[in-house]
Image: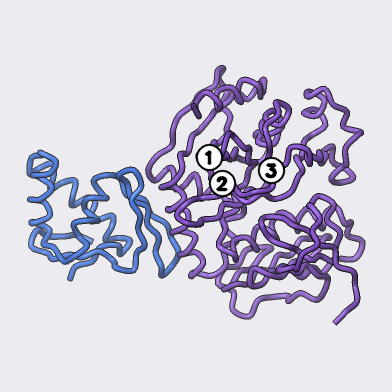
Chain colours: A blue, B purple
Amino acid sequence: MKFELEDIIKRDPEMLSSNMDGETVMMSVENGEYYGLNEIGTRIWELSENEIKVNDMIESLMEEYDVDRETCLADVMEFLEELGKKKLIVKV
Amino acid sequence: MNNRKLYKYSAFGLVIGSEIELPELLSSDIDTEIKIEFGETPVELQNPIKKGLRFQAAENEFLLHVDNVASFYVKNGDSITIKKKENADDDSVRLFLLGSALGALLMQRDMIPMHGSTVKIDDYCIVITGVSGVGKSTLAAQFFKQDYQILSDDVSAIKLENKQAFIVPSYPQIKLWADAIRKFNDNPGSHRKLRDNIEKFGIKIHKQYYTKPLPVKAVFILNTKNTEGIDFDEVKGIEKFNALRRNTYRFQFVDGLNKQKEHFQTINQIASLIKVYRITRPRKGFNAEELKNIIIEKLK
């Protein structure tokens, strides 16, 4: 699933998640599957608790991680694609 | 209703009335809350949520079929029904009863049964976990030999209470192979053989068995490598969660999605309260004394 800058996204509210030393462990209430997110993934997960525009997310992360737009864009899109594949993040 | 005798025991903080004799457990004489009985078990569960080759799980129900031994039906965290197969020996029945069946019961009662041994250190305890055969019991026996008290061997049940994680004592026995027993300058023949054709023995440890729950400070995962020397590191993050989950006794038996949710949360709470360490020993040359010393040193 490809995401665009103007897409509004939100995370799956049916995921149980827990922070563990800066990473996130998650469990799907629907199918009992487990997932793990590293630090960046954790931040993306946090930011998508409420609806957020992909572009706004990128701007936030750029500030937080002091990273250039190109890198941030590439990383975030890759992440969103993975999460999107598993329906952990959806377009609203 | 039947008139079969009930043997009463205390284990994992529970009082058990059992139709099958369980010499490993400590006797009790107060009111029972758990019943272990012989009887008919279902062939299948009505609405299984999880199904494996030999087991099925549903909300508060667990069914296990062990070829040539018995079927075990565990319900509501308070009853186990055993349907013994013809010609099954009691030793084998007890092995699966005190292992998988009891593990499922503990999970139905929201305890997390870790696969490992628990040692008392000062006013807390540690759990030594790892895959079968890596040396958990032998390491626990090393502590035992050096006068430490033991809360459990094989299954260590974690219970959350008042925002603390406790290990609940199980029963006063350490299971060791004959060669480990000899290394401790003891004679295997003076102990009870667990199963006829296997050189594993049940060592009674009543004199150093601690009977009260203790807060657990750390879990040590024992594993092996091909190189020399002992490695030691702390496990954090997702790996910590996975390590606790993987070393839970038969975690795949968790019955029903609601329980799975609760267990997920319980494991996370436990993870936030304790440290998890990995201690890796060389495959050749098991130096239990050295491992014990490293653990004690790290706990200071």
Per the model, the C-alpha gap separating discs 1 and 3 is 18 Å
As displayed, is residue B268 above or below residue B253? above
Establish if B286 lies above or below B191: above
Tell me residue B289's x, y (percent): 65, 21
Q: Which mark is residue B247?
A: 2
User: Label 3: chain?
Assistant: B
Residue toward you, B263 or B164: B164
Q: Nearer the viewer, mark 1 or mark 3?
A: 3
Viewer-side label of 2, 3: 3
Q: Are marks 2 and 1 on the same chain?
A: yes
> What amino acid is found at the position of numbered circle 1 in the picture?
Val
Numbered disc 3: secondary structure: loop
Structural crowding at the residue carrying mark 1, measured as other residues with C-alpha within 10 Å and reported as few (<14), some (14–19) or many (≥20): many
Q: Are marks 2 and 3 in contact (CB under 8 Å)?
A: no
What chain does badge 1 belong to? B
Picture coordinates of residue B103, whole percent (x, y)? 65, 57
Q: Mark 2 or mark 1: which comes first in sequence?
A: 1
Q: Which residue is mark 1?
A: B219
The residue under label 3 is B210
N-terminal of the pair, mark 1 or mark 3, is 3
